[in-house]
Image: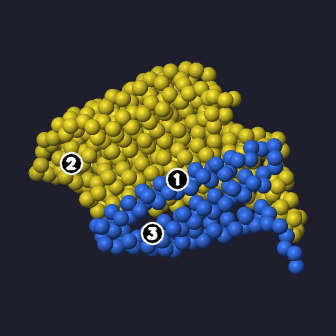
Chain colours: A blue, B yellow
Amino acid sequence: MILPPVGLLHYLILSVCLFCFGLLAVITRRHAIGILLGIELMLNSANINLVAFSHFLSPPHPVLDGQVFALMVIALAACEAAVGLAIILRFYRQTTVTDVADAKLLKW
Amino acid sequence: MPYSNLSVFAPELSLCGLAILVLVADLIVPRAWRRLPAGLAAVGLVVPLYFVARLWQKAPQSEFMGAYAIDGLSGAFKILLLVTGFLVILLSFDYLRKLQRGYGEYFALLLFSLTGMMLLTGAADLIVIYLAFEMISLSCYVLTGYMKRDPRSNEAALKYFLYGAAASGVMLYGISLLYGLGGSTRIIDIAARFMASGPAAAVAVQPAFLQSALVQAGVPELYVMRLAGLMMPLAVVLVTVGLGFKIAMVPFHAWAPDAYEGAPTPITAFLSVAPKVAGFALILRLLLVWYPELMGHWPALLASLATITMFGGNLWAIRQTNIKRMLAYSSIAHAGYLLIGVVVAATNSMGLHGIIVYLVAYLFMNLGAFAIVLLVARNMDGEEISDFSGLYHTAPALAAVMIIFLLSLTGIPPTAGFLGKLFIFGAAIGSGEWAWLAVVGIINSAISLYYYMNVARVMYFGKPGEQVLTVCPAGVVVVAVVCLLGTLGLGLFPGLIIKLIQQCV
């Protein structure tokens, strides 16, 4: 059996799956770092979209925009993880937990 | 086009330079001069303000191959942002002295986030939009958690960060879909591509790559059309989630009350005004470029979101006992009123002017209210509404000024808030189609009267506390006076500002 070549659709399906897993992790995880991982999955699913679109877009359009965008997103994801981990660490130092269900000083 | 004209970028460059200067000055000056960077930050804001004012008079143009727009709209928003930044820096002096934490990084972060907001007002490219978005968010997360020994501040930063990062992830996915559908990252090129294929574009546009890819993969023709037609609305909704987070729109508002309550009070004041200004600038730009080709149903979506935002903000505000939290919910409600303006702005320039007038009014009245909260909290050591008890007896002038800000927030003449609401509701009624939104807005103003006047009741009829007001930091008093003049001036002499806005935008 000969498989069809990998096309745009396959990338899109992959990215949708990745995005949904990321969103699921953000919603269901109670560990702050687990949520952060889910967010990274969401960012990377967008990256797959960007690179795939950039590759498959028809020739008259600028081809590299999406790839450059993806590079920017990777850099920003790193910044976001750095700031996020610092904030999570401060929270951990004070409460000795990283479970977001324990963040209940501020409510309603 | 090999080189872009950097002079149009002068406001952002000078602001970014100022932030770096503040950071470096904090490192090299001796301990005795520690407050120098703070003064530098406040005085230095004059430079970007000068550049913005100079560019404001020029014809609209776009630079960096269409990625950045300079026009009357972005100019007006930039001036609003710089004024907000200046007032917040004045509010911060005394707060930081009491906090006994460093000055340099605080003001540098504030200026960096202000730079991001200025970028967002002119962003005309998906990459710039995302970068500016993150620049604002990352600085704001850190500022929210600035009191690192205070568990509430830490918790606020954690919640703000987790919500914010998730929202930006969702928005980025929407942006990546928009890039794929439009074939470009410039918002104007995306619009042009959709315009070329007529209003039924959502289905007709993708054929070249998406539909052939789907057909190749063996998906039946009928489903191909349907799938392609679904992608555009999905992308728009995902982007709306990100924007809704930034301006604290219900149901993406959950971070706001917690972040506002836990953050240092000057930062709360900053968060309640500046990101909203920047967010609305972006919403308006997308709307003006993309309506109606890409976003035919956006006004209807925003109208329903505006309704639940107004009701949600006002109804939750009623049960608050902490004044910062109450103002947080009130700021959510104000985002709802502003959204009415956006809905109308799609078809009518009255809405556009209404939003800017409302934002000017909101800036003065909200920052003014926060200045009074700071003064009271400084003396009473608490931020509960009960700390305002009997303020009329211990500090009558302060209570009177607070009443004026509260009346303005409700929208009662002759204050700035009345003028803003008059413009926005007037535009909604004038548009015909959206007149019902004005009715919802007026009902909500009536609801808001209840909780604003509750504070007034506590101030006038509550039992005065033991403490009297002894500390009156100069910076905070200056902000209160400026905001009072702005609130009353705009209410009593509206002609000036209206003329200026109609001329330039």
| Discs 3 and 2 share one subunit | no
Badge 3: residue crowd in 10 Å (few <14, some 14–19, many ≥20): many
Q: Which residue is mark 3?
A: A33
Compared across the picture, whether B367 is left or right of B283 comes to left
Badge 1: residue crowd in 10 Å (few <14, some 14–19, many ≥20): some
Decide if residue B114 is in sight here: yes
Identified by mark 1, the residue type is: Leu
- The Cα atoms of the two marked residues, 3 and 2, are separated by 31 Å
| Chain of the residue under the numbered disc 3 shown in the image | A
| Discs 2 and 1 share one subunit | no
Q: Residue at x 43, y 69 (%)?
A: A32
Q: Residue at x 38, y 71 (%)?
A: A98
- The Cα atoms of the two marked residues, 2 and 1, are separated by 31 Å
Q: Which residue is mark 2?
A: B100
Q: Quadrant of the C terminus of chain B?
A: top right
Q: Position of residue B152 (x, y in %)?
A: 30, 61
| Chain of the residue under the numbered disc 1 shown in the image | A
Badge 2: residue crowd in 10 Å (few <14, some 14–19, many ≥20): few
Q: Which residue is mark 1?
A: A76
Decide if residue B326 is in sight here: no
Q: Quadrant of the N terminus of chain B?
A: top right
Compared across the picture, whether B417 is left or right of B32 comes to right
Residue at the left extreme? B466
Tag 3, which secondary structure? helix
N-terminal label among 3 and 1: 3
Q: Residue at x 83, y 64 (%)?
A: B214
Identified by mark 2, the residue type is: Gln
Closer mark to the observer between disc 2 and disc 1 = 1
Tag 2, which secondary structure? loop
